[in-house]
Amino acid sequence: MKPQDPTPRKTMHIAARGNSFKYAFAGLRQIFKQEPNARLHAIAAVVAIIAGFIRHLSPIQWTAIIFAIAVVWITEALNTCIEKLCDLWCDNKWHPEVKIIKDIAAGAVLVAAMASVVVGMIVFFC
């Protein structure tokens, strides 16, 4: 007799895929509700997109702008996840190692945001 696999199999049912999108959008809503920096990133993204339409960017320029926006959003989402996991792990109590982990994750967002500013400066001003 084979032991039963404890992990459920993911199915390709349309309803299951729809739920995946529903959960993903719920996660994005949580970022907006809980993270003030996410709202700043959203404003910056909208400004960049509007400026792109005004400046009639080339496809390669659009690619650079969209990629820069995506990298900032990805790092912001991962930073939020890391912060939440750390807070769970230490019961929301201060811990020196958790502070280091959270600072490093925040630093990653800062690097992504600074790089996106550089990309925007190159695309819009060069």
Image (cartoon, rainbow, N blue to C red):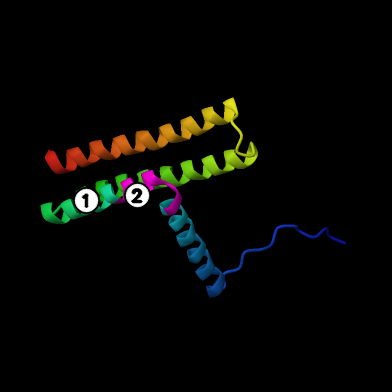
Name the front one of labels 2 and 1: 2
Location of residue 77 with respect to 13 vertically, above or below: above
In the picture, measured across the screen, residue 24 lies left or right of residue 96, that is left
Dot 1: element: helix
* Nearer-the-camera pick, 44 or 35: 35
| Residue sitting farthest toward the top | 96
Residue 105 sits inside the magenta stretch: no
Mark found first going from the N terminus, 2 or 1: 2
Which residue sits at x=62%, y=64%? 10
| Residue sitting farthest toward the bottom | 14
Q: Image quarter for residue 114?
A: top left
Q: Amino acid at mark 1?
A: Val
Location of residue 50 with respect to 101 vertically, above or below: below
Q: Position of residue 51 (x, y in %)?
A: 16, 51
Q: Which residue is under mark 1?
A: 47
Dot 2: element: helix
* Nearer-the-camera pick, 119 or 95: 95
**Mark number, residue 88:** none
Which residue sits at x=22%, y=53%? 49
The region drawn magenta spans: 33-42
In the picture, measured across the screen, residue 33 lies left or right of residue 118, that is right
Q: Position of residue 53 (x, y in %)?
A: 16, 56
Location of residue 26 with respect to 43 vertically, above or below: below
Identify the image quadrant of the C terminus. Answer: top left
Mark 1 neighbour density, 10 Å: few (under 14) some (14–19) many (20 or more):
few
Q: Position of residue 120 (x, y in %)?
A: 21, 42
Q: Which residue is under mark 2?
A: 39
